[in-house]
Image: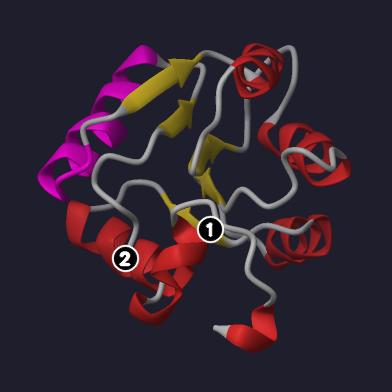
Amino acid sequence: MLDPSAPILIVDDFVTMRRIIRKALRQLGHTNTEEACDGREALSKLKQAPFAFIVSDWNMPVMSGIELLRAVRADPCLRHIPFLMVTAEATRENVSEAVEAGVSSYIVKPFAAETLRLKMESIFPEDAASEAAGAEVPADQS
């Protein structure tokens, strides 16, 4: 599982949703969070400081979550960061688009802290703790 002290970036245009995600992460023991109100602000923060995990809404003005995901995956310095997409609609088209863009997982709003925990466990399995901490370990050695 992700180290509780690892920095997590929460990206959503609604302050209430950022607060809900932050609270759910705190319930899971993760208190090192930073927030951004859209993809552009998130990308700026990602280039200024290291993050171990990104939790981003899909629908946002200025730069959407899917645009942020594509930008993160296109950047050699950022592409390793696990990315959880938060969406109000899990249509087959949206899920396919996110998977093609390299999303680690997705979660449908509204969700409980337990659902977030399960998603995080699937992204950060116990035997990959060193990868979750940011170490670059080839997949065949985990």
* Residue 104 in which image quadrant: bottom right
> Residue 22, position in %: x, y?
26, 31
Per the image, label 2 sits on a secondary structure element best described as loop
> Residue 90, position in %: x, y?
58, 59
Q: Is residue 87 left or right of residue 65?
A: left
Magenta span: 15-30
Instruction: Looking at the picture, tell me which residue is in the foreground, 2 or 95.
Output: 2
Task: Characterize the magenta stretch by its predominant secondary structure.
Answer: helix
User: Which residue appears at 42% of the width and 74% of the height?
Assistant: 122
User: Which residue appears at 21% of the width and 53% of the height?
Assistant: 112
Q: Which mark is residue 142?
A: none
10 Å crowding of disc 1: few (<14), some (14-19), many (20+) = many
Q: Is residue 83 left or right of residue 34?
A: right
Quarter in which the C terminus is drawn: bottom right
Task: Indicate which disc, 2 or 1, sits on the residue closer to the N terminus.
Answer: 2
Residue behind mark 1: 106
Q: What amino acid type should be assigned to the residue bearing mark 2?
A: Met
Q: Does residue 92 lie above or below 6 as drawn?
A: below
Residue behind mark 2: 1
